[in-house]
Image: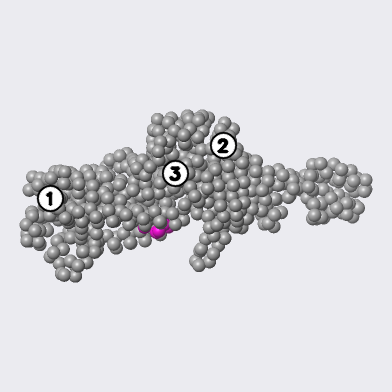
Amino acid sequence: MIHTNKLTKTFTVKKETVEAVKGVDIDVAPGELVAFLGPNGAGKSTTLRMLTTLLKPTSGSATVAGVDVAKDPAGVRARIGYIGQGNGGGHSYRVIDELIMQGRFYGMNTTDAKARAQTLMASLDLSDLAKRTVIKLSGGQRRRMDVALGLMHSPGLLFLDEPSTGMDPQNRANLWEHIMRMREEHGTTIVLTTHYMDEADSMSERVIVIDHGTIIADDTASRLKANLAGDLLAVEVAAGSASDVRGLLGRAAAEGDMEENAYDGVVRFRLRLAQGAQLAPGLLKEMHDAGAPAQSLELKPPTLDDVFLELTGRSLREGAEV
Amino acid sequence: MIEQAVAPGAALQKRGPRSVVTDTWFVFWREMLLPLRDPFSLIFSLIQPLVFLGLFGPLLGSAVGAPAFGGQSTLQWFLPGVVVMIALFGTSMTGSNLQYELMTGSYERILATPLSRSSLMIGRALKEWAPLVLQGLLISVVCIPFGFIFHPLHVVLGLVILGIFGIGLGALSYALALVSQNKEWIFWGVQQTLLFPLMILSGIMLPIEAGPGWMKVASLFNPLTYLVNAERELFAGRIGMDTMWGLVAAVVTAAVGLVVGIRTISRNTN
């Protein structure tokens, strides 16, 4: 569905050249749900805007829905749907008018466009707002309208740029419900950008981590976490027997990376285990056999933030808020 | 529940031939929804030229004197000028409505649709021109009791020529709005700074023949001059060389405007 070859975008800001996207290679198969994850300014949106023909690549090539973005941008636009970061509805327009015009822009006839608009408004709880002007809608209502605009022509490939930014949890959940249902029913291929790692984690099958304009990881969320981060294990032993297990735990820790703090007569070891759930029981037995039974244990599955931290040495959370 | 009114991709298969004409119609129609949903703005736009004609016309006659009008009545001379002026003000504002859409995501949303780039500009420019058809016909009819001789077909041809000119000016205004994005004052600064010299140097308000020689020379390089002359000829019920030159000026303006506009749009996007 998408194939890029060394796709690159450089901007010139105040006579300085900034490489926003540095030769990325992306392949997306039909029906996939892919999230571009990365901090603000990582190049996610720039990549998305090149794929949707809103930005001209500086070099490299991209084929989207079987069409080359440089050779036939209008052909690409006819085959995709795009929901941008901003609100798509014109301020002074009525919701229903904008939806119907959007359908017309994509070549639907008025009858089909009207029917489709009604269906989408019903499913996105916008029916009561059909004749309201966009400027009178709340933020969440506007975002739902953006989704309706993007779905009007039932695109087989849908791009969403930060779809849930600024939405409350309830509306975020609703939005995802709609997107997931559309995908289930029509096999729509979906590509989105997000800086919410929990969103990338729970919703996408495949996560492409982008930082400083390059792809630094590309896999399923669960494999990324298992391979790159591992579970976080915290065990406590009596202070007197810490030395009996320090070596044992250090060898088990991924890359030998382990922290320890002593307090109230216990020593707390914190380490990453590649497959914590499988390894922890054996480790407990070994500790017991070494004469230092664990007094408490905590095992935390990794998050994508841990993955990002492992890859870049920085937390995604620091760069997450604008 | 998202159900499918049409099968996925069906919209693509059903599509008729895409053309700049149908795309322009869609863009024009979306723009027209604003005044149609809120007709008060149209009523005001009809009153405005009448006020101008009623208050400025009498002053003009007594201040300048009849010989400068080439033997026509003041009204016959001034009315086509007012029509050109409305066209000038209207279509040079094309970019200002775009500015609002640039600030939200609505321009980008439309840019991501398969609409052709030229239709985005032409459709918007024509929306600014459309009220002129009503305005032009209305003030012509209103002026009949005051000695204005109304030649309907000539007036309609005059409005068409203004429409062609308006597409060019509208496209330039569109490009200006894109270039001055995030710096809205630049748009207004440039628009106002250019508008008034162009207007005065075309003889819309006062006959350029009454001015010094350098003004007459400068007016020859102003496309608007040819347009105003053409409209005067047409409103007087004649079709001659002035009309021809007016048409040429309109077509050249449209061509230049569209080239500049399309280049500006595609400088960044595809």
Q: Secondary structure at mark 3?
A: loop
> How crowded is the residue under tag 2: few (<14 C-alpha within 10 Å), some, or many (20+)?
many
Q: Which of A112 and B19 lies nearest the eye of the viewer?
A: B19
Left or right: A69 in relation to B103: right
Residue at which label 1 appears = B238
Q: Is residue A268 visible?
A: no
> How crowded is the residue under tag 1: few (<14 C-alpha within 10 Å), some, or many (20+)?
some
Q: Residue at x 10, y 45 (%)?
A: B144
Q: Residue at x 40, y 58 (%)?
A: B179
Co-location on one chain, circles 2 and 1:
no
Which label sits in the foreground, 2 or 1?
A: 1
Q: Residue at x 56, y 37 (%)?
A: A188
Residue at which label 3 appears = B114
What amino acid is labelled 3 in the image?
Answer: Pro
**Chain letter of the residue beneath label 2 in the structure image:** A
Which label sits in the foreground, 1 or 3?
A: 1
Residue at which label 2 appears = A188
What amino acid is labelled 2 in the image?
Answer: Thr
Query: Is residue A125 highlighted in magenta?
Result: no
User: x, y percentage for residue B232?
Assistant: 15, 53
Q: Is residue A59 visible?
A: yes
User: x, y percentage for residue B31?
Assistant: 34, 44
Q: Secondary structure at mark 2?
A: loop
